[in-house]
Image (cartoon, rainbow, N blue to C red):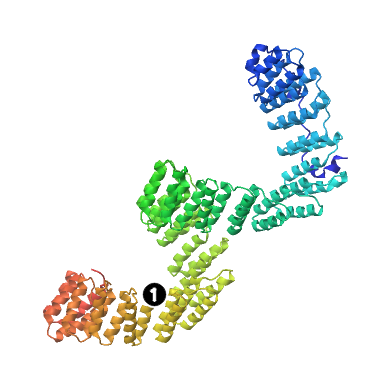
Amino acid sequence: MSQMALSPCLKCLPCTPHHNPARSFIFHQASKPERVNSSNFPRICSRNPRALSAAVSSGTSKFSFEYLLLETLRREEDGPSALELFKWASRQPDFKPTLPIYQEIIQKLGNAGSFNDIQWVLDDMKRLGVELDEGTLFIVIDSCAKFEMYDMAVDVLDLMRDEFRVEPTTHTYNFLLNLLVDGNKLILVENVHSKMLREGVVPDGSTFNILIKALCKDNRIRPAILLMEEMPKYGLSPDEQTFTTIMQGYIQEGTFDGALRVWEQMAAAKCPWTNVTVNVLISGFCKEGRVEEALVFVQEMMKEGFCPDQLRFNTLISGLCRIGHLDHGLEMLDLMLQKGFDPDVFTYNTVVAGLCKSSRVKEGMEVLDQMLSRGCEPDTVTYNSIISTLCMENRVQEATELARSLTGRGIIPDVATFKSLIHGLCLSSKFSMSMELFLELKTKGCKPDVSTYNILIDLCTEGKLEEALELFKDMESSGCSRDVVTYNILIKGFCKIRKIEEAEKIFDQIELQGLSRDQITYSILIDGLCKSKRVQDAARLMDQMVMEGLKPDKFTFNSILTYFCKAGDLKKAADIVQMMTSSGCSGDVVTYNTLMKGFCKINKIAEAEKIFDQIELQGLSRDQITYSILIDGLCKSKRVQDAARLMDQMVREGLKPDKFTFNSILTSFCKAGDIKKAADIVQMMTSSGCEPDVVTYSTLIQGLCKTGRTEFAVRLFRSLQMKGMDLNSYTYNHVILALFIGGKVKEAVRLFREMEGKGISPSAYSYKIVFRGLCSGGDPIGEAVDFALEMMEKGHLPEYSSFSMLADGLCALKMGKTLVKLVDKIMVKAEFSDREVAMVMGFLSIGNFTNGLTAFGRILDSRSPRKG
């Protein structure tokens, strides 16, 4: 029975000679025992001193005294005290310690790690001729292993054979090998196994199982299988432990299918299984995330008499809930109750967390009620799952009430509880209440963590940057270390309000605080720089980012790409896309949408169409924005039929056109005067569930007015008012202009006054329309003069093209003085220079209205219409 034949798998372990010092503690000269007299006894024996003292003084039989001594030693927990008692007993007349007493004292000393005292006891046994048995050997070996003195444990074998003539058996070697495997001393395992074979000790099934366990522990599954296959050569068959150990090895290695193959091999060998094997496989299924398969396996095994234990129920329920199979998890919870297992707080917490994560908070609260009714006390984890979900669902009031009820149950809300509530209030933009709760958190003695601060600072960046900076300072005074996320939030806040210099200062602080900027830090600031038209600085910052070992992502590249596309520099935009590709960062649909929009903006629709086709070739899916951009571009290029076909394709691909898409096509049809098709688009919008908005109807009204269908436009306008739609000046302007064009001046002016009466501020274009209409409408000229004065009071300058018509009318009616006064008021409002005023008034004062008005008109037109 050679070593190689038995253990081909272990030959690859490094085989180093076993370290055997000249004399370990086992061979040290034992010190002489301390002399203990009977007066010391009451102090030494704390458990049963009177009984033993009485036994000695009354001459009780050896048997009774030995029994009392053994019982007293067993009750004594302190090793040194037990040894003193033993020494005292050894000095009593006619008393000779027996093997059980020696074993008990060795056990006590071993538990205390008193190995020198163990040596003294062994020497005393030898002196008195007390024969050791295998049990004593086990006690000494186990004591060494407890204190990780594995070399010493191996030396015990030689000591027992050389000093006490106790030959180690297969059982002895198995005991030692198992301790070495549990201690992960695999080289010593090889040495002891080799020694076992050299000494002719025959291995049994347990030996093989222990060696297989050692190999599996070292993730050497193939050698373990080879060793199992050699068992029949020695008349041994693999048992459940053999197969199960290899299954565990495969699971530990992450090759669960290998474990299933061993399970099939075990079944083929007709090796009986127990719950241990099945539980190992259940754990393996769950570890691999194959919880559904685990459930099927359990159901099959239950038909054969298997019943999961509490741990396995917990594992299954946890796994099912984590992958979203909550109904199966709840069924398993019911089964657990039927089988007489009481779910613990861990099991319930898993179920509650799973339900809450799936927005089934009502059922989560029902499980909470079940916990309470079964006497299982929920903890903060249970409540935090429910509170967090309620807050995410904007049910902050309910969450707050639940949180306040915790103290009544003796549960103290923790930082996570407060954090959830604060986050919920922040989501509802309730800044004041968030801060109140934050202060309460601090007064309750809970120390806010960095994520709590970050939530509040993030809320503050929405228009409350001063408060955000105060919280930022408070972190330092409260001893809460900021993380890179804190700085990122502030940088984002400053970029949002275009305070880029402040954002750059925060960016520089990160490194000074000993933190490392991350990819998000750079991307936020690069985006801010691009939006502030500092694209060269953004490019330099991206170079710095790369030098620091950070890789720009799609967001980073898209920020710079967007800048160039908005600026109409499509060549540089294309260079950015090329740079993305060469750096291994594939563009996403946002990248291609941005490029398409850029090409459409400069009316290069053919290029945009190429990008549109390229999206699919890149393995990406076009989204609603993709189609809307190209449809709008086609419409603006007067290719409305192509745009309509593209919208049909969009619908076929399962994408829903939005108002922007419909309005683009609607505008094209209206501009082309095809009102029927425009009306069809509005009908299509409604039938597809996309409610037309004020822009839609304003565009349609404009189309009706443009084609001379003013009456229909007015009807549609009035019907929209009756429906309660909020119309704007843009809508009114179209109808007012159409009425003026149709010669309905009074109706047009009345509609203008109606707009004012409804609290809708007329735009500069509104005033332009009415003024021009009054000047050319043939109505009393005084109304036009009054309106000119009114519009100037509202901060709007009249256009000279319209004013010239009024001036002609005033001149024809010999109202020169009125004209001069009106011109003077306009020049004041338009802030003419003194020289300009002098020139105009010089002509007008001598009645040279032609030259005066020409100079006036030239200067007035050079002034952009503006609010005064």
State which quarter of the image contains the N terminus. top right
In the picture shown, does residue 521 fall above or below 787? above
Specify whether 768 is left or right of 20.
left
What residue would you read off at disc 1? 693
**Secondary structure beneath disc 1?**
loop
Residue 291 in percent (x, y) is at 64, 56
> Dot 1: few (<14), some (14–19), or many (≥20) neighbours within 10 Å?
some
In the picture shown, does residue 244 fall above or below 15? below
Determine the image quadrant of residue 821. bottom left
Give whichever of 171, 479 is nearer the camera. Answer: 171
Please state which amino acid type lies under the numbered disc 1.
Answer: Asp
Q: Is residue 315 visible?
A: no
Give whichever of 867, 148 is nearer the camera. Answer: 148
Please report the residue visible at 12 percent of the width from the left and 85 percent of the height from the top.
Answer: 814
In the picture shown, does residue 245 fall above or below 853? above
Q: How many marks?
A: 1
Determine the image quadrant of residue 115. top right
Residue 310 in percent (x, y) is at 64, 47
Please report the residue visible at 19 percent of the width from the left and 82 percent of the height from the top.
Answer: 806
Specify whether 866 is left or right of 627.
left
Specify whether 537 is left or right of 99.
left
State which quarter of the image contains the C terminus. bottom left
Residue 384 in percent (x, y) is at 49, 50
Specify whether 609 is left or right of 859.
right
Q: Is residue 822 visible?
A: yes
